[in-house]
Amino acid sequence: MCPLCSILETGTHILFSCSAARALWSFIREALGSDWEAGDLAEFLQGRATQPGHKRRLFWCIFVALMWTLWTTLNKMVIEQIFPRRTSDSFFKFLTFLQYWHLLARHRVRDLLGVMLDVLVAAAQHLCAPWACFGVCH
């Protein structure tokens, strides 16, 4: 059972419909645009994973970091009973994965990913700025 939603855990639920997944997808969509709308894996990949060249590589870097963030966050809740204190925790975890992987990317993809990281970090800072004085965000 999903520790947040109390429904049967499936791949689609973990990665797309869980409240933790919806929050992270909303953040991505807000920062990168409506073409990052996702309801299920097949539908999403059909439109995005077939892009040419560097855009496809960039997509996969971001997508894998997003999936890994969701997977590790929910595993931590289910296995270790450790829950995020704030919704923004998953945003920053996602950004941390991307920053690490940015260093491993090919030169051209690294440059594009750097631009995407700047946009994502600015979006995270913008979302958290009003709450910073309350200690809600990092």
Image (cartoon, rainbow, N blue to C red):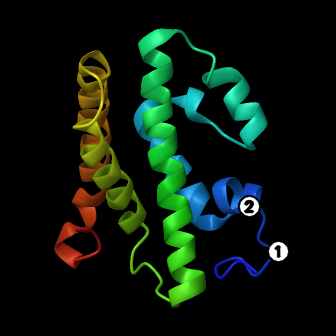
Query: Please, which residue is most extreme toward the right here?
Result: 8
Q: Is 100 drawn above or below residue 22 in the view shown?
A: above
Q: Name the residue: 49% across, 49% down.
A: 66
Query: Please, which residue is most extreme toward the top here?
Result: 52
Q: Which label number is shown at residue 23?
A: none
Going by the numbered disc 1, the residue's amino acid type is Leu
Q: Position of residue 137 (x, y in %)?
A: 27, 68
- Mark-to-mark CA distance, 1 and 2: 8 Å
Q: Nearer the viewer, residue 130 or 26?
A: 26
Q: Quadrant of residue 104?
A: top left
Q: Is 114 drawn above or below residue 25 in the view shown?
A: above
The residue beneath circle 1 is 8
Check the picture and name the quadrant holding the N terminus: bottom right
The residue beneath circle 2 is 13
Q: Name the residue: 26% across, 26% down.
A: 110
- Judged from the image, the secondary structure of the residue bearing numbered disc 2 is helix
The answer to whether residue 29 is visible is no
